[in-house]
Image (tube, rainbow, N blue to C red):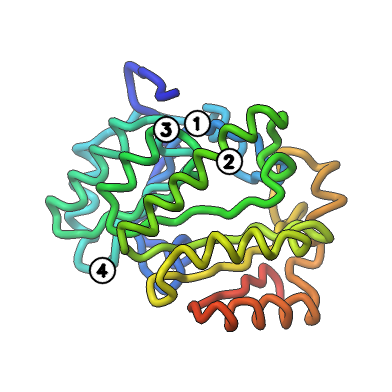
């Protein structure tokens, strides 16, 4: 459910980022709070409402005014921004008033995501499979959230806006669910999709929520094997979409 906070909470913002949306310079804002417990999450303190500060719209507006000529979009990420619908609406409103497109990064599992994606010019989301394992949630809860996610994908595909579909790759696990991923990606027009293959990593590159889980499923090398990269490349090219395979360390 959405949280009724006296003060909206963010982890901060960065006027210029080259890493949050593929091929774009973004003014990135981090929202606090999340409804998932992903074991690989490296932003888990903020997701659990730690290291947060009150949202200051006037300060944000002033900094965006100075940066707007140099950025392609404002990107609101988290945490899970749709837990704070008012924050999503405020960031979108200020962004568009400055003539800057608004990008929303959402896990698409909350009921509010279905409405809030309507105000976005670009949406980024993760296809987490198997969902219960990667979301860190009990099976019954994860089933409800997964249905919400699929409904959100259907709605998003009908909107025909650009999307970035990110695949968090768990070692020895995600490759077993390529059919599920394919079914989701094929809902979208290929020319509107950027597919990001993102191998999950652990220390010292990140500080994951569940170090034991990451020792089993994350890539200590910081990248996929050459064989895995080749398989993902073939997968994306068959779908006819733009793609990027992330390498944390070359």
Report the disc number at residue 70: 4
Of labels 4 and 3, earlier in sequence is: 4
Q: Nearer the viewer, mark 4 or mark 3?
A: 3
What element does badge 4 sit on? helix
Where in the figure is residue 107, as x and y percent of width and height? Answer: 50, 44
Which quadrant would the N terminus be assigned to in this image? top left
Q: Which residue is mark 2?
A: 146
Q: Which residue is mark 1?
A: 33
Residue in the image at 41% along x and 63% along y: 163
Disc 1 to disc 4, how far (Cα)?
Answer: 29 Å
Disc 2 to disc 4, how far (Cα)?
Answer: 37 Å
Q: Which residue is mark 3?
A: 111
Residue in the image at 84% along x and 60% along y: 172
Vertically, is 38 above or below 18?
above
Closer to us: 79 or 235: 235
Q: Is residue 76 visible?
A: yes
Closer to us: 232 or 213: 232
Give the quadrant of residue 180: bottom right
């Amino acid at each position: 459910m959405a949280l009724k906070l006296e003060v909206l909470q963010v982890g901060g913002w960065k006027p210029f980022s080259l890493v949050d949306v593929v091929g774009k310079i973004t003014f990135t804002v981090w929202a606090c709070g999340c409804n998932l417990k992903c074991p690989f999450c490296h932003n888990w303190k903020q997701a659990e409402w730690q290291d947060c500060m009150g949202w200051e719209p006037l300060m944000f507006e002033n900094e965006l005014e100075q940066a707007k000529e140099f950025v392609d979009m404002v990107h609101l990420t988290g945490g899970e921004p749709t837990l704070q619908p008012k924050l999503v609406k405020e960031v979108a409103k200020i962004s568009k008033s400055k003539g800057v497109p608004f990008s929303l990064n959402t896990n698409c599992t909350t009921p509010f995501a279905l409405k809030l994606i309507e105000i976005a010019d670009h949406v980024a989301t993760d296809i987490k499979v198997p969902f219960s394992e990667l979301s860190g949630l009990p099976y019954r809860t994860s089933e409800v959230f997964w249905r919400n996610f699929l409904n959100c994908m259907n709605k998003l595909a009908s909107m025909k806006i650009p999307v970035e579909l990110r695949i968090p790759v768990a070692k020895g696990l995600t490759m077993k669910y390529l059919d599920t991923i394919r079914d989701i990606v094929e809902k979208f027009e290929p020319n509107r999709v950027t597919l990001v293959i993102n191998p999950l990593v652990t220390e010292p590159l990140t500080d994951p929520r569940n170090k034991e889980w990451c020792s089993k499923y994350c890539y200590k090398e910081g990248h996929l094997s050459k064989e895995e990269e080749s398989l993902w490349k073939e997968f994306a090219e068959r779908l006819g979409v733009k793609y990027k395979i992330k390498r944390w360390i070359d």
